[in-house]
Amino acid sequence: MSSAIFDRRERLKRLHEAGSPVFAPSLLSCDFGRVDEVLKQLDADGVTVVHLDVMDGHFVPNLTFGAPLIAEWRKNTGLTFDTHLMMTNPGRYVDDFVAAGCDTLVFHIEIDHDPVPLLRHIRRAGVEAGLSLNPGTPVSMIEPFLDELDTVLVMSVQPGFGGQSFEPKVLSKCRRLKALRSDLRVSIDGGINLKTAHEAVSAGCDLLVAGSAVFRGGTSPRQALDALYASVADHVPRVKTP
Ligand code: DX5
Ligand code: ZN
């Protein structure tokens, strides 16, 4: 493995070069007992980016992992870490996530504070910054901050758990975001499968998070990703397979 890919700028460059759409396997649905092996295999399979779900048991009714575990995983992989902070107080921990080797840090607009100082703090650290919207949260909530963002993560399920059903009503928000800023990376998270991936890409989504579809579909992650890419290939000329 090249040492260059342990450099954050290089990892973000690889993410940008992966083009649109790109699928990001969500580790939430993998075997937490063997994450290092999973990451190694995903890297060998040609995956560029993985999605990390940090849950604090307060913003969402579930707990996962924090910066110390991410730092351990980072020791052995150059995969891009797209990090989804489902936390009431992300600002308290953001420096730890930067130091742990996260490449994007996305927090929720629903927490009660002005997001601009934290977004700027994240970007100054060389990490991409984003805001996430729960299914019921309108785009107007983040419109004033669009220029401060590298990405928006549109939740297509209530955050907290994998394996839920996709809420198609959120697709209009993806279209709206692309109309407002065509260069914004629009990510979508929750219930992505062979059918909904196509709907999401048609609505302009660039990065599609997939947990259950990659790790719990009864095939290998590589086969699952091949099928997901195939499901969008005939509709999207820019599609790039891993
Ligand atoms: C849910 C998480 C998702 C989750 C998606 O709160 O944010 O990233 O892993 O899982 P699936 O793809 O199974 O809906
Ligand atoms: Zn997520």
Image (cartoon, rainbow, N blue to C red):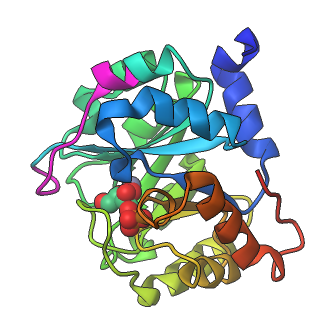
Q: Nearer the viewer, residue 157 or 135?
A: 157
For this view, does 61 lie left or right of residue 228?
A: left
Residue 1 in the magenta stretch? The answer is no
Q: Is residue 115 above or below residue 220?
A: above
Q: Nearer the viewer, residue 157 or 183?
A: 157
Residue at image point 49% right, 61% down: 210
Measured as percent of width and height from the top left, residue 146 is found at 55, 58
Can see residue 181? no
Q: Give the residue at the far bottom of this rendering.
A: 169
Residue at image point 10% right, 49% down: 58
Measured as percent of width and height from the top left, residue 84 is found at 39, 47
Q: Give the residue at the far top of this rendering.
A: 3
Measured as percent of width and height from the top left, residue 102 is found at 48, 29
Residue at image point 69% right, 42% down: 45
Q: Is residue 181 above or below residue 24?
A: below
Q: The magenta stretch spans which residues?
A: 58-71
Which quarter of the image is occupied by the N terminus? Answer: top right
The picture quadrant where one finds residue 206 is: bottom right
Main SS of the magenta segment?
loop
Q: Is residue 104 above or below residue 224?
A: above
Measured as percent of width and height from the top left, residue 39 is found at 52, 33
